[in-house]
């Protein structure tokens, strides 16, 4: 359980770090992607974009 929590936190931090790049290619604007301000910081929660990226990664893994 601790391993999955660590993976989730690392993925969350990576998505927040790549928020600008994801928005430039159009992945941060899908329905299901949430962005809000909390304590003076903008928090980006890309639920739909993570599903799309997971499907792309699974497709690439299936092909290899």
Image (cartoon, rainbow, N blue to C red):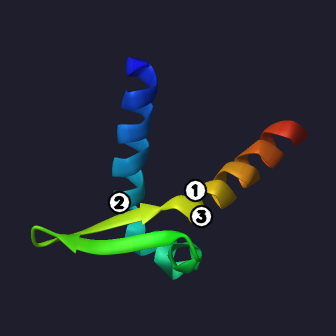
Residue 39 x/y as whole percent: 10, 67
- In this view of the protein, which residue sits in the foreground, 18 or 28? 28
Tell me which corner region of the image, top left, top right, bottom left or bottom right, holds residue 37.
bottom left
> From the viewer's perspective, is residue 29 above or below residue 13?
below
What residue would you read off at disc 3? 48
Q: Earlier in the sequence, mark 3 or mark 2?
A: 2
Q: Secondary structure at mark 3?
A: helix
Q: Is residue 15 left or right of residue 62?
A: left
Image side of residue 40 versus residue 55, left or right: left
**Label of residue 14 in the image:** none
Q: Nearer the viewer, mark 3 or mark 2?
A: 3
Q: Are marks 3 and 1 in contact (CB under 8 Å)?
A: yes
Please tell me in which quadrant of the rendered image residue 62 appears.
Answer: top right
Where is residue 32 drawn, in percent x and y? Answer: 55, 70
Q: Is residue 64 visible?
A: no
Query: In this figure, which residue is indicated by the disc labeled 1?
Result: 50
- Mark 2 closeness class: few <14, some 14–19, many ≥20 residues within 10 Å: some
Q: Where the C terminus falls, by quadrant?
A: top right
Q: Earlier in the sequence, mark 1 or mark 2?
A: 2
Looking at the rendered structure, which numbered label has been put on residue 16? 2
Q: Position of residue 59 (x, y in %)?
A: 82, 47
Residue 3 in view (yes/no): yes
3D distance between C-alphas at marks 1 and 2:
12 Å
Q: State the residue lying farthest toward the right.
A: 63
Residue at 43 percent across and 19 percent down: it is: 1
Q: Position of residue 23 (x, y in %)?
A: 48, 77
Position of residue 18 in the picture relative to residue 41 (left or right): right
Distance from the alpha carbon under mark 3 to that under mark 2:
14 Å
The residue shown at (58%, 77%) is 31
The reply, left or right, for residue 60 in relation to residue 21 is: right
């Amino acid at each position: 359980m601790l391993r999955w929590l660590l993976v989730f936190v690392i993925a969350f931090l990576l998505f927040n770090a790549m928020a600008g790049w994801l928005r430039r290619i159009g992945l941060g604007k899908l329905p299901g992607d949430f962005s809000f301000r909390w304590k003076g910081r903008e928090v980006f929660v890309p639920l739909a974009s993570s599903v799309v990226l997971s499907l792309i990664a699974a497709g690439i893994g299936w092909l290899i």
